[in-house]
Image (cartoon, grey):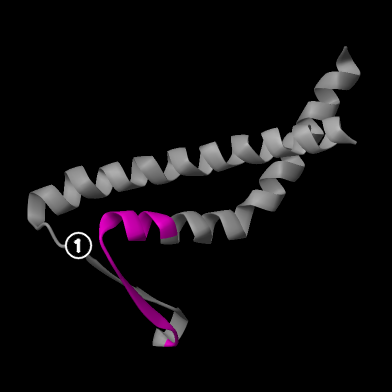
Amino acid sequence: MKDTNAIEKALKEKCQKEINKVIDVFMNELEVKIRSKYNNNNYYDFQGPNNSERFHVMGTEKMRNVLYRMISNAHIESMIAVKSKELIKKLELI
């Protein structure tokens, strides 16, 4: 059981790194192509559909954390499931 937990933990860490890479690319694009070129605004307004829910973040690190939580909450479980199936498929080929 320990090995299964270690494998699941490793898969989750791999998925977290993958999400972080996507966010790193986005944050770099934001910094290089928008913030540095047009303005150095550090205030971001998030709004739900139809202006229903609203919250604000100040600073790129806080925005990065919000993006990570949003993407992770929406996708990490399915990412782990797909990677688990891929791993099982590879192991069966051996």
Decide: is 56 above or below 32: below
Q: Percent position (x, y) of residue 80?
A: 71, 43
Horizontal side, residue 58 vs residue 77: left or right: left
Q: Residue furthest front?
A: 2
Residue 91 belongs to the span the image colors magenta: no
Horizontal side, residue 12 vs residue 94: left or right: left
Report helix, strand or loop for mark 1: loop
Decide: is 88 above or below 82: above
Please state the total of marks drawn on the protein image.
Answer: 1
Q: Percent position (x, y) of residue 20?
A: 46, 42
Q: Quadrant of residue 2?
A: top right
Q: Percent position (x, y) of residue 10?
A: 68, 33
Screen quadrant of the C terminus: top right
- Could you say which is closer to the camera, residue 2 or residue 82? 2
Horizontal side, residue 42 vs residue 38: left or right: right
Q: Quadrant of residue 38?
A: bottom left
Instruction: Please give the name of the residue rendered at 28% of the width and 55% of the height, measured from the top-left corner.
Output: 60
Bounds of the magenta segment:
52-65
Instruction: Please give the name of the residue rendered at 28% of the width and 42% of the height, measured from the top-left corner.
Output: 28
Decide: is 12 above or below 50: above
Instruction: Please give the name of the residue rendered at 53% of the width and 38% of the height, measured from the top-left corner.
Output: 18
Q: Percent position (x, y) of residue 65?
A: 42, 57
Residue 62 belongs to the span the image colors magenta: yes
Instruction: Please give the name of the residue rendered at 70% of the width and 49% of the height, measured from the top-left corner.
Output: 78
Q: Label 1: how many residues lie within 10 Å, few (<14), some (14-19) or many (20+)?
A: few
Q: Residue furthest top?
A: 94
Task: Give the residue pinned by disc 1.
Answer: 42
Type of the residue with mark 1: Asn
Screen quadrant of the N terminus: top right
Q: Residue furthest left?
A: 38
